[in-house]
């Protein structure tokens, strides 16, 4: 089997694994709903990432739905476009998602950092979400 083909299949499998096992909620830790500033308004921004063993917490502070994928920093590749369209987990405006370390693609007990890749969506005329723009990324120490 061609090594390049095998590597592509391995990365695709890892990407799908990175999308599994995470949960999104529409309320914040303080009980407020969909509001990063607590007063019912969405604040434009980015995806905030916080590592508290054994989980990462991702918080969407943008004005749109975002998709995301989390991979071990040792196996991360540069993605210039959303890797999985609507199949990746999404976080609505102002909400948070919890990603267990064990759901990070490539995670081992020796992992020291992870890369959170995220992108925004826009709603098409047919109501479906379509990736909009490039992939942003944040590195977080585990």
Image: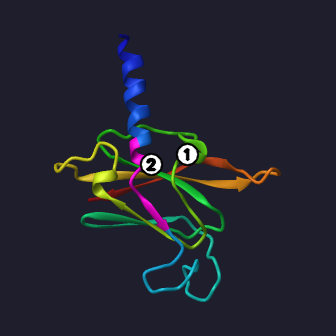
Is residue 121 covered in magenta?
A: no
What residue do we see at 63% from left, 71% from top? 44
Q: Are marks 2 and 1 in contact (CB under 8 Å)?
A: yes
Q: In the shown orientation, is residue 7 left or right of residue 36?
A: left
In the image, residue 48 lies at what x, y percent? Answer: 46, 67
The residue shown at (58%, 58%) is 66
Residue at 57 percent across and 43 percent down: it is 82
Which numbered tag is attached to residue 87? 1
Q: Which quadrant holds the C terminus?
A: bottom left
Residue at mark 2: 19
- Sequence-first tag of 2 and 1: 2
Q: Left of 9 or right of it: where is 102?
A: left
Give, as a single range, the part of the protein colored magenta: 17-24
Report the side of 11 relative to 95 (left or right): left
Q: Position of residue 15 (x, y in %)?
A: 43, 40
Q: Quadrant of the N terminus?
A: top left
Up-down relation of residue 104 to residue 94 (above or below): above
Q: Name the secondary structure under disc 1.
A: helix
SS at mark 2 in the image: helix
């Amino acid at each position: 089997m061609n090594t390049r083909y095998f590597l592509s299949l391995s990365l695709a499998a890892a990407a799908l694994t990175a999308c599994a096992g995470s949960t999104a909620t529409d309320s914040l830790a303080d009980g407020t709903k969909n509001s990063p500033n607590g007063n019912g308004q969405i604040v434009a921004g980015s995806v905030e990432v916080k590592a508290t063993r054994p989980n990462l917490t991702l918080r969407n502070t943008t004005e749109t739905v975002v998709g995301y994928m989390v991979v071990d920093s040792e196996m991360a590749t540069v993605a210039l476009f959303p890797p999985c369209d609507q199949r990746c987990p999404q976080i609505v405006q102002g909400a948070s998602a919890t990603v267990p370390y064990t759901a990070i693609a490539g995670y081992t007990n020796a992992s020291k950092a992870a890369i959170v890749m995220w992108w925004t969506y826009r709603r098409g005329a047919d109501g479906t979400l379509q990736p909009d723009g490039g992939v942003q990324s944040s590195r977080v120490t585990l």
